[in-house]
Amino acid sequence: MALNDFPTVDYAGLFLLIGLVSNPDWAWVDGPIYASSTPGGLTQTAPSETGWVQSVGVSYGADGADYMLFSPMWIKELGERAQLPITIDVDDTEALLVRKDGDAGDVFIVDTVNSRVGIGVTPDDWLHIKGNNACLKLEDDSGNYARIKVGDSQLTIEVDPDNLVASTDFVIKMDGEEVARFLVGGQFRSIESINSKLGFATRLWDIVGDDWDTTPGVNTEYYSPNQHGGIYGTVYRQYFATTLPPSLTSGSIVTRLVDYSIQFKYTTSDRGLGHGNATAYGSSENHIYIMLTGASGSGNLAFAKTGYTSQAGWCDYTR
């Protein structure tokens, strides 16, 4: 800043690079001072031009309306708001503090010592939000949103509170896999549908594949859709065609035969369904059923049949 008339011959004169300067004609208010778009002028109105503009100092208002701290810096003008390109490189529990006017309360705090951010509170966790009915709102580009709110001694999670989407579900995933889902209408699928094998109305869980089987078939071990309330422990199921699954006819892995169903054929033409046992179809000597070898402990499964042949079926068992 030139402190005397700017010379036109040899450019010699008295200049201020940084510091406090006074002019009795000034009447600044508290705030930044900019280089005006008028050459050589000063203003407290940020120039509206886009690009880079220059702040030349700051005034402290009524405490020194005719003073300014001259300290030039470049300011990036973004749209209609001037923002300083600031990097906060300091360890402090209030490295960045945004406060209401008149010290009426802290709004936003960045704690670089403990890597925490607080909204309405000095943070004691990674992200700490405090307030009456404090709420976190998550919204996508289409305007669909969810809210997590604390208030009235309860935690409320609202999914699509404005009912913008007709069939919104609340899904919980772990390790990329769905473990629970709240459905519209009040239905709930929990992790118990996997761990306790409940509610397998439309899908089968492949034990070896550790996933829902999209193409279920014979000789694959699944969790049974019928767990009998857990009275037998975990119940498994395998489907079969004309012969029982090889893994159940050798190796003695079965500890209990819980239930089975056989679609059978009698002699050469007639067909039927036996649930548990099929006997006396044609004569008292004809029968088909599944047996577990051994009076106790683990054993193998085997058909006992006369006059019948298996067409398809399933068996539930424990291991």
Image (cartoon, rainbow, N blue to C red):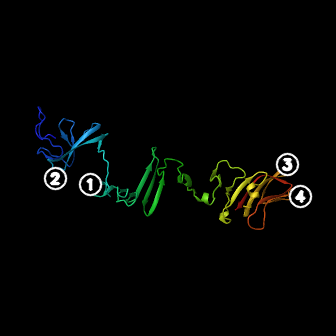
Q: Are marks 1 and 2 in contact (CB under 8 Å)?
A: no
Q: Amino acid at mark 1?
A: Asp
**C-alpha gap between disc 1 and disc 3:** 92 Å
Q: Earlier in the sequence, mark 1 or mark 2?
A: 2
**C-alpha gap between disc 4 and disc 1:** 97 Å
Name the residue at the top extreme. Answer: 9
**C-alpha gap between disc 1 and disc 2:** 18 Å
Q: Are marks 3 and 4 in contact (CB under 8 Å)?
A: no
Q: Amino acid at mark 2?
A: Asp
* Occupied quadrant, residue 308: bottom right
Identify the mark at residue 63; answer none if there is no mark: 2
Q: Earlier in the sequence, mark 2 or mark 4?
A: 2
Q: Earlier in the sequence, mark 2 or mark 3?
A: 2
| Image quarter hosting the N terminus | top left
Identify the mark at residue 101; answer none if there is no mark: 1
Q: Which residue is mark 3?
A: 269
Please rate how many residues cluster around mark 1, counting C-alpha atoms within 10 Å: few if below 14, some from 14 to 19, many from 20. Answer: few
* Foreground residue among 146 and 122: 122
Please rate how many residues cluster around mark 4, counting C-alpha atoms within 10 Å: few if below 14, some from 14 to 19, many from 20. Answer: few
Q: Which residue is mark 4?
A: 283
User: x, y (%) of residue 223?
Assistant: 66, 57
User: x, y (%) of residue 294?
Assistant: 78, 65
